[in-house]
Amino acid sequence: MSVAMFVATALVGAGCDLLPFPEAGWKVDVVNGDRPLLISITTDRAAWAWFVPANAELVLLDERIAPVEGRIELIDAERNCMVLDKADLPRSSLTITTTQVGADLRDYELALNAGAPLVGPASQDFFGGCSG
C-alpha cells in the first residue's frame, strides 16, 4: 500500500471529514408536517424538486453514491413559492422533518436527522417549478 493510500485510509477510518470521498448508498427521506411543501435538493450531480403533501412520509432519493456537496430548500407550496428554510446537505443518509415554529405560516423550519429508515421506492412526484 502506498503512503498516500495509507494516509487516506487512516483519515477516513478516523472519521475525518477532510477528504471528499462520497458515501456509498445515499438515501433521503422526508417526514412532513401539517401543510403541503416543496422540497428542493441540489447537489454537485443533479437537482430535484418534489411536491410533498401534508403529513406525508416519503423516500425522496435512493442513490448508489452520495454527493460531495449540496443544498436543501424548504419552499412554500401554497402561496408564492417563498423559501422558508434552507440547509447544507450532509454526505450521509438523512431524514428531513418539517415543523411550523411560529404563528406566521412563513415560520417553518427543516431539521436534518441522521439515517433514513423509510422503506419504499423513491418518489417520482417531481415538481416542475413555481409561478407567480
Image: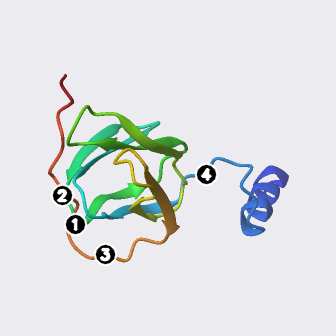
Residue positioned most to the top: 132
Gap in Å between the C-alphas at discs 1 and 3? 12 Å
Distance of label 4 from label 3 (alpha carbons): 25 Å
Height in image: 105 above or below 10?
A: above
The residue indicated by pointer 3 is 118
Q: Residue at x 48, y 43 (%)?
A: 86
Specify the quadrant that holds the N terminus. Answer: bottom right
Query: What's the CA distance linking mark 2 and mark 4?
Result: 34 Å
**Residue indicated by mark 4:** 21
Q: Which mark is residue 56?
A: 1
Task: Assess whether mark 3 and mark 4 are in contact (beta carbons under 8 angstroms).
Answer: no
Look at the image and name its color scheme. Answer: rainbow
Q: CA distance from mark 4 to mark 1?
A: 32 Å
Q: Is residue 46 left or right of residue 126?
A: right
Helix or strand or loop: what does disc 4 sit on? Answer: loop
> In the picture shown, does residue 132 fall above or below 35?
above
Question: Relative to the observer, which residue lies in front, 51 or 6?
Answer: 51
- Nearer the N terminus, badge 1 or badge 3? 1
Left or right: where 60 falls relative to 71: left
